[in-house]
Amino acid sequence: MGAGRDQPLVAVTGAAGAIGSKVVEQLVARDAAVLALDVDAGALGALEADGVDIETCDTSDLDSLGDACRAAQQRRGPLRAFFSNAGVQGPTKPVREVTEQDLLETYRVNVTGVFAGTRVAIELMTEHGGGGRILNMASGSGLRGTAGLSVYVSSKHAVVGLSRCAALEVASEGIAVNALCPGCIDTPMMHAVAEGLGEDESSIVATIPAGRYADVDEIAETAAWLLLDAPVYLTGATVPVDGGWAAG
Ligand SMILES: NC(=O)c1ccc[n+]([C@@H]2O[C@H](COP(=O)([O-])OP(=O)(O)OC[C@H]3O[C@@H](n4cnc5c(N)ncnc54)[C@H](O)[C@@H]3O)[C@@H](O)[C@H]2O)c1
């Protein structure tokens, strides 16, 4: 079925990336209308399809994010779900070498961008009074530390904290806010992090109870469920999809 005003509108940031593009696929397969947002206009073009609106947008720019979502609402009806997925890996270096610039660049996307997405989503969902689901991409790095990855790890801990606070603020309005915490996924970002840390990937896999990296589809299916089908009573949660890594 083609998406129209009767399909739920879901916004996805970082939509052109390894995980975002699979989430868009999963949402369309579940008959949602998708607003796909990314800074990478070229890669975003590949997502153009029936039911998918693409918009080049820097998520840390609150005004352009709000404008893009309001314009999509005009075409597709009220925003029902928002996935702040855009993120960058940041530098791999010890704390004593981290610069202010390292923090500003990584936090701008991973923290300011997720704050902006959460705020826009709350504003729009509150305006139409119909509840909704907000999902923020944290990571296993939002739950545990890794030596050499302090900038990324601290940014993802911030995503977990923000999601918990927002969940408390809007639960009574029927809006769920959760943080997704995937472990290691078979993606270019994961391979780049392993290389930056100077780690042999087989030694990383050895720390995962399931004995393997996640497939992107496993993360995308979980995200699509949390965005479209999960009870809104499931809120304020950190949802690990990590082969048991954070349980230890
Ligand atoms: N890959 C993993 O193993 C892994 C594990 C846990 C969590 N995550 C998180 O999942 C998310 C997606 O990761 P991925 O592997 O798909 O990475 P990716 O690099 O493939 O995709 C990230 C996307 O975000 C976009 N982006 C970057 N800055 C942006 C901005 N300011 N505004 C809008 N878009 C912007 C990029 O253009 C890119 O398309 C990230 O938040 C990442 O931290 C990834």
Image: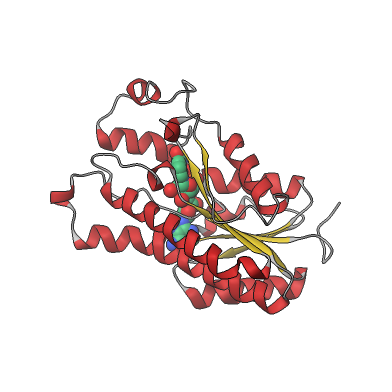
Single out the residue that lies furthest toward the left: 96
Q: Up-down: is 211 above or below 79?
A: above
Q: In the shown orientation, is residue 101 left or right of residue 59?
A: left
Picture residue at 69% right of the left edge, 49% below the top = 230
Query: Residue 137: x percent and y percent?
Result: 50, 52
Q: Could you tell me residue 245's position as x and y percent? A: 43, 31
Residue 207 horizontal/vertical position (percent) = 37, 25
For the point 48% across and 32% down, the residue is 186
Q: Residue 149, located in which quarter of the rendered image?
A: top left
* Residue 104 placement, left or right of 57: left
Residue that appears at 24% across and 39% down: 147
Q: Which of 40 and 94 is in front in this view?
A: 94
Say which of 230 and 138 sits in front.
230
Residue in the picture at 23% in, 62% down: 101
The one of 200 and 154 positioned closer to us in this rendering: 154
For the question of whether residue 10 can be seen, the reply is yes
The vertical placement of 103 against 127, above or below, is above
Residue 54 in the image: x percent, y percent? Answer: 63, 61
The total of numbered circles placed on residues is: 0
Is 222 rendered above or below residue 88? above
State how the image is colored: secondary structure
Quarter of the picture containing the C terminus is top left
Q: Height in image: 155 above or below 174?
A: above
